[in-house]
Amino acid sequence: MLRARGREAPAEDPLLGDEAEAAEAEARLIATGEGRRLRDGLAALETPHRAAIILAFVHGLSHPQITERLGLPLGTVRSWLRQGLMALREGLG
Amino acid sequence: MIPTDPAEREALVAEYVLGTIEARQARAIECAMDTDAALREAVAAWEKRLAPLSELATPALPPPGLWERIAAVLAPPAPPRAPARAAAAPGLWRAWALAASAAAAGLAALLVLRPGPEPRLLAALLAAPDQPAWLVEAEGGTLRLAALGP
């Protein structure tokens, strides 16, 4: 699985995760049934949950990096990630 | 180190696949996966769930000149190359690597297959400084003598 882990310069949009970075990328995401379901599952999450998951997975950021990026305490980021993931699992079935 | 509570376990696995847990914990999960089939399944399920997201990652191109720098490290006294030739370098390296591998494999086969070396010693016994009289040949624990004189 290809991930942009450890990249130092994530995209400019601080809330990335709200939208795909580029229309092309979203088109690739929804090109498969699984991708569409995942997109819908993510769309159903609350914005901060979604942002934390996307920052972690797509941009390869660690907890401290997400904390810095979103300007929130570490504990909050931790629990958002966890709640977001569990909600995503519920949503995807 | 891996929690037994199902909800905790699931959360840990999800974060493992997300890539946000500490390296120490990640190693613990990887070790536990060797013996814990349920854990392996949970990891596979999360990988499947999140895999489509990797499409959102921007493909990253290696910085220009990376290959030349790698090649320079591999072969320190690399002669400077014209840019046109540099484009062909990966092909040359591949060919070189294949040839080197083949040569190494050949040498290995030779070492394995070749019968043990048989030391063969020869000595000439001289009747006078310029007059060899006998040739002594030692091979495989036997000695052979050959008269050289008339």
Image (cartoon, rainbow, N blue to C red):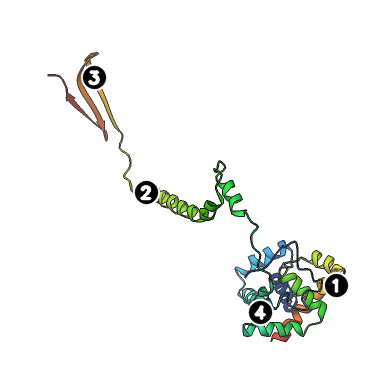
- Tell me the subunit letter for badge 3: B
Q: Where is residue B147 shown, x and y percent of the image? A: 16, 23
Above or below, B56 against B62 in this view is below
Q: Do the residues marked 3 and 1 share a common chain?
A: no
Q: Where is residue B96 shown, x and y percent of the image? A: 46, 51
Instruction: Tell which of B109 and B144 is nearer to you.
Output: B109
**What residue is pinned by disc 2?**
B112
**What residue is pinned by disc 3?**
B125
> What's the residue at 69%, 79% (across, down)?
A26
CA separation, marks 2 and 4?
A: 53 Å
Q: Is residue B48 left or right of residue B120?
A: right
Q: Do the residues marked 1 and 4 share a common chain?
A: yes
**What residue is pinned by disc 1?**
A76
Q: Where is residue A40 shown, x and y percent of the image? A: 72, 85
The type of residue carrying mark 2 is: Val
- Tell me the subunit letter for badge 4: A
Q: Residues within 10 Å of mark 2 (few under 14, many from 20)?
A: few
SS category of the residue bearing label 3: strand
Report the disc number at residue A29: 4
Q: Is residue B69 left or right of residue B142?
A: right
N-terminal label among 3 and 2: 2
Q: Nearer the viewer, mark 4 or mark 3?
A: 4
Q: Nearer the viewer, mark 1 or mark 4?
A: 4
Say which quarter of the image contains residue A9.
bottom right
CA separation, marks 1 and 2?
A: 63 Å
Say which quarter of the image contains residue B116.
top left
Direction top: furthest residue: B128
